[in-house]
Amino acid sequence: MKAVYVAMMAAAGVVMAGQVHADEEALAKSKNCLSCHAIDKKLVGPAYKDVAAKYKGDKNAPAMLAAKVKAGGKGTWGQIPMPPNNVTEEEAKKLVAWVLSLK
């Protein structure tokens, strides 16, 4: 019986994680992030999976990237600048957490 409970809780966690990712992807779409970025291929900006790989294990990355999302930036991924984005601090942090969670 305990094994069934553990399996059910694990399945619920997977479903909830999937919902969180769906919510964050919807946020990215609503903020037009996916006009320049894709999850797994370079468009105007880098693929989100490439961003996640570049900053894997960097404890300073979430704050630094959230600041870049809000203020914009240039030079890290080439000469095409990323403009400032109309997002709240909380939205920027959610978007960055989602991007960094991609594998």
Image: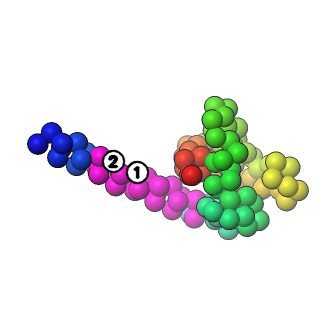
Which residue is tagged 2?
13
Which SS class for mark 1? Answer: helix
Q: Which mark is residue 17?
A: 1
Q: Which residue sits at x=40%, y=51%?
A: 17
Q: Which residues are magenta?
A: 10-29
- Check contact, mark 1 vs mark 2: CB within 8 A: yes
Q: Which residue sits at x=18%, y=42%?
A: 3
Asked if one can make out residue 10 in the rendered structure from this viewpoint, the answer is: yes
**Identity of the residue furthest to the top in this view:** 59
Question: Which amino acid does the dot numbered 2 rest on?
Answer: Gly
**Residue 1 sits in quarter:** top left
Question: Which amino acid does the dot numbered 1 rest on?
Answer: Ala
Q: Position of residue 60 (x, y in %)?
A: 67, 32
Q: Is residue 81 left or right of residue 94?
A: right
Q: CA distance from mark 1 to mark 2?
A: 6 Å
Is residue 23 depicted above or below 10 in this figure? below
Q: Position of residue 43 (x, y in %)?
A: 73, 67
